[in-house]
Image (cartoon, grey):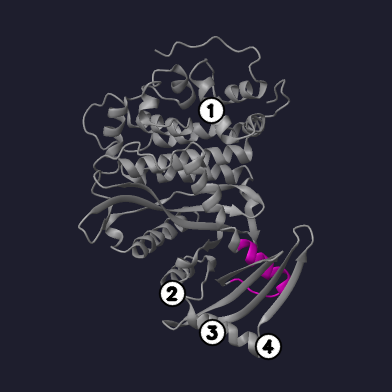
Amino acid sequence: MESREGIKARKHLSTNALIRVVQERFSFVKDPRRGLVEIPLSDALMSAFAMFSLKCPSLLAFEEERKNPNIGRFYHIGRTPSDTRMREILDSVAPEEIRPAFADVFRCVQRGKILERFAYWKNCYLLACDGTGYFSSDKVHCTSCLEKHSQSGRITYSHAAVAAVIVHPDIREVIPLCPEPIIRQDGTEKNDCERNASRRLLSHVRKDHPHLGFIVTEDGLASNGPHIQDLRAHDMHFILGAKPGDHALLFEQATQAIDDGTAITWQTDDPHKSERKSYTAVAQLPLNAAHPDLMVNFVSCTVEKGKKSTTFSWVTDLPVEPREMMLPLIERGGRARWRIENETFNTLKNQDYHFEHNYGHGFQHLSTVLMMLMMLAFLVDQTSQLACPLFRAAYAAMKSKRALWERLRALFFTAPFEDMEQLYRRIIRGFEDFPTPVNSS
């Protein structure tokens, strides 16, 4: 379909279609409530999803607009619950019930050939993983909260999750998979908590995507024996950060190989960036003294730009030959890990998703369910940015994400529209033929 703006919409990958995919999945979620219910669970789930899709700064702000007819039309909601009722309904929903919606949207990405753009090496995809916190309080807590006890006896309650996003060094957008909540039972130490959640995450990723090839890229906390064994068990390649302080034996042997002249070295200059990259690689070294039989390939890259010099190091199971192809590929893949920091966590925290805002904590699962719904809305946004020309044109017209969300909310809550496509076209055209405002009371 093409309009007078000359923009052809891909119906199956439009924001409208993706919203419908989410709504259809939520209609199958089992309602834990018994007896007759006033508001269907799917309406409550879609209402919370709509709140994050519209980037409402709080549940109260969404509550003030919940009777706006656009909400029902855009998000296929029969009845939008009040803020209190939404919290009550969603608190008892098991977080696992949200997971299939991520897989449904991901299948749209696959069918639309969007995923093919992210192929990195031999049809494998870079999967950046990292943990992040999204709630902290000295007073508010639930049964799933992590607890941190200070020496003075003060308890800090928090929620965190391990996220996984498909990235590519040449693509700004990311494709988030379903995050894995870090729960209280995962351990008493931060590393134990994150490792146990990461183990579940890898299992779920492989179950949801049994035929996809992955190259997992993570920071230095992940370059430990048990985690690498988990990666291999799930048939996943890896590029993991490595630091001298954490891998003394590994760096000693790499240094010895350099001194012996057995290390692989290569150097390249990039005149466009005025930088020089010097690579060093050593194949088949033991990871550490605790795992002498766990062999990995070691790669380091020193980037010199002017007077500044920075060295990055990784352990990987990717081959290091031919050096001209594989060493830059490993370096770019390892450094692409920052996509999960810059294009995921920073976006969620600083571009109107309000990731660290407490929309509601509850007593069971509310905080986790809301976090997963926010990440699901982010997945739909990223997919729209990758595949929906109307979204991209609206984004280009507004020049920034924050301006786009502000204009979208302003129009959504003041004028009638049939769907997101019509709203995007209005943003693209500006204020020409502005429709009559809607009375949302």
Q: Picture coordinates of residue 168 (x, y %)?
A: 62, 54
> Compared with residue 139, is residue 44 higher up or lower down, i.e. above or below?
above
Outermost residue, bottom direction? Answer: 260
Q: Which residue is mark 2?
A: 225
Dot 1 falls on a residue whose secondary structure is helix
* Mark 1 or mark 3, earlier in chain: 3
Is residue 114 in view? yes
Give amino acid for label 3: Glu
Q: Which residue is mark 4?
A: 261
Contact between marks 1 and 3 (CB within 8 A): the answer is no
Q: Residue at x 52, y 22 (%)?
A: 410
Front tag of 4 and 2: 4
Q: Nearer the viewer, residue 365 or 433?
A: 433
* Mark 2 or mark 1, earlier in chain: 2
Gap in Å between the C-alphas at discs 2 and 1? 47 Å
Could you say which disc has been placed on residue 252 in the image? 3
Q: Picture coordinates of residue 46 (x, y %)?
A: 41, 31
Q: Residue at x 26, y 33 (%)?
A: 88
Residue numbers of the magenta segment: 318-333
10 Å crowding of disc 2: few (<14), some (14-19), many (20+): some
Q: Picture coordinates of residue 53 (x, y %)?
A: 48, 33
10 Å crowding of disc 1: few (<14), some (14-19), many (20+): some
From the viewer's perspective, tell me whether residue 254 is left or right of residue 360.
right
* Mark 2 or mark 3, earlier in chain: 2
Q: Which residue is mark 1?
A: 406
10 Å crowding of disc 4: few (<14), some (14-19), many (20+): few
Contact between marks 3 and 4 (CB within 8 A): the answer is no
10 Å crowding of disc 3: few (<14), some (14-19), many (20+): few
Gap in Å between the C-alphas at discs 1 and 4? 59 Å
